Image (tube, rainbow, N blue to C red):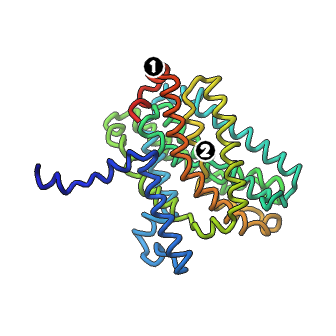
């Protein structure tokens, strides 16, 4: 054996063996760093170090990397695959949105702004309307087909604060703003630009094929930097309750439709069942005269749900896939052969 062989400790290979590991492990490391630095020693490591470290590993660089992911995803998009995504992934996202916003409205009618069990209307809405599109991409990367990946752009747009902010504005003095519209346009441009370039130049498509693989670990660190485990566990009871509600509401209805009506494996619904870090920004953006009383508690509870769902989601997806392959081996071989390699 050569000397180089002995020096290769195969970190990347180890990460790929863990469900969503290329994002999940950096997320855990990032959350531990944030917890130790901010929760125990009360300072922000990334702010102290400054750039480029700050934008590489803290939440301040999330939007840039999300833009790069959108561009890379767009380069891999074919028009025919987007049509397929409209019939599967995007349809499931729309169904989920209808269900969760209807539930939010019912929650308000039943419990008002104050909510119940320490979970306010603001907290409930910020949680159940969110989905972590980036973690979804990290989870399905080894086995998802191009149609699943084509749904990423639409899912990411729905992940941004615009929709919940518009919904919450109905219960305050807000409304559709210029900034909301610009945010949507800013998300669409890199995705559409990538799709255009990838379809007119196959070299661009090939070069950026592994772009998301490179970005994933950094995004994992950035999401982890939003999680202070001490603050998250300070609202343990409400966090547990809302985590269970979140997983049930975001996964079960979509999974039943995907599995028994669309006859798909169900991994789309499960892999997209985690809270997005950007949802923690929503309590700061809403009308504070209406929701200001609940801002602090909402962010703490969301931090718990963020930690719990981002940790559980990769494993739930893996267990779903293992069950599917064992229960329906012929169907898996025909429609999802990549699952057999997971």
Q: Circles 2 and 1: CB distance less than 8 Å?
A: no
The answer to which image quadrant residue 305 occupies is: bottom right
Q: Position of residue 225 (x, y in %)?
A: 51, 65
Q: Which mark is residue 234?
A: none
The answer to which image quadrant residue 304 occupies is: bottom right
Judged from the image, the secondary structure of the residue bearing numbered disc 2 is: loop
Q: Position of residue 116 (x, y in %)?
A: 83, 57
Q: Tell me which label, 2 or 1, sits earlier in the chain.
A: 2
Instruction: Please identify the residue farthest to the left as the structure is shown.
Output: 2
Q: Position of residue 248 (x, y in %)?
A: 69, 43
Q: Which residue is the site of mark 2? A: 273
The residue drawn where x is 71% and y is 51% is 164
The residue drawn where x is 32% and y is 42% is 207
Judged from the image, the secondary structure of the residue bearing numbered disc 1 is: helix
| In the rendered image, the vertical position of residue 328 relative to residue 300, given as above or below | above
Q: Position of residue 51 (x, y in %)?
A: 42, 71
Q: Judge by depth and name the residue closer to the eye, 306 or 316.
A: 316
Q: Which residue is the site of mark 1? A: 334
Q: Is residue 109 left or right of residue 130?
A: right
Q: Which quadrant does the C terminus fall into?
A: top left
Q: Judge by depth and name the residue closer to the eye, 255 or 208.
A: 255
| In the rendered image, the vertical position of residue 14 relative to residue 122, given as above or below | above
The residue carrying pointer 1 sits among few (fewer than 14), some (14 to 19) or many (20 or more) residues within 10 Å by Cα, namely few
The residue drawn where x is 46% and y is 34% is 144
The residue drawn where x is 47% and y is 56% is 220
The residue carrying pointer 2 sits among few (fewer than 14), some (14 to 19) or many (20 or more) residues within 10 Å by Cα, namely many
| In the rendered image, the vertical position of residue 312 relative to residue 300, given as above or below | above
Residue 126 in view in this figure: no
| In the rendered image, the vertical position of residue 80 relative to residue 175, given as above or below | above
Residue 261 in view in this figure: yes
């Amino acid at each position: 054996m050569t000397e180089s062989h002995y020096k290769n400790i195969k970190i990347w290979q180890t990460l790929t063996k863990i469900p969503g590991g290329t994002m999940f492990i950096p997320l855990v490391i990032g959350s531990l760093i944030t917890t130790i630095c901010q929760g125990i020693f009360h300072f922000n490591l990334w702010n102290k170090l400054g750039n480029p470290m700050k934008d590489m590993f803290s939440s301040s660089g999330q939007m840039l990397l999300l833009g790069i992911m959108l561009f890379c995803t767009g380069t891999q998009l074919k028009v025919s695959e987007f049509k397929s995504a409209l019939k599967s992934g995007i349809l499931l996202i729309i169904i989920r949105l209808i269900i969760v916003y209807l539930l939010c409205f019912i929650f308000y009618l039943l419990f008002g702004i104050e909510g119940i069990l320490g979970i306010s209307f603001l907290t409930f809405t910020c949680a159940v309307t969110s989905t972590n599109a980036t973690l979804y991409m990290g989870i399905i990367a080894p086995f998802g087909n191009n149609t699943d990946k084509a749904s990423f752009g639409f899912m990411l747009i729905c992940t941004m604060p615009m929709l919940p902010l518009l919904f919450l504005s109905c219960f305050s003095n807000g409304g559709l703003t210029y900034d909301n519209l610009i945010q949507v346009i800013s998300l669409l441009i890199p995705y559409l630009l990538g799709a255009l370039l990838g379809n007119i130049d196959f070299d661009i498509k090939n070069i950026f094929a592994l772009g998301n693989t490179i970005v994933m670990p950094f995004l994992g660190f950035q999401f982890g930097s939003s999680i202070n485990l001490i603050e998250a566990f300070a609202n343990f009871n409400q966090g547990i309750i809302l985590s269970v509600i979140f997983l049930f509401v975001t996964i079960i209805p979509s999974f039943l439709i995907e599995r028994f009506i669309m006859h798909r494996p169900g991994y789309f619904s499960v892999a997209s069942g985690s809270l997005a870090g950007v949802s923690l920004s929503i309590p700061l953006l809403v009308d504070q005269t209406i929701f200001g009383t609940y801002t602090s508690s909402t962010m703490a509870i969301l931090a718990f749900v963020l930690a719990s769902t981002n940790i559980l989601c990769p494993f739930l997806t893996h267990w779903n896939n293992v069950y599917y392959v064992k229960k329906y081996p012929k169907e898996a071989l025909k429609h999802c052969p990549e699952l057999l390699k997971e």
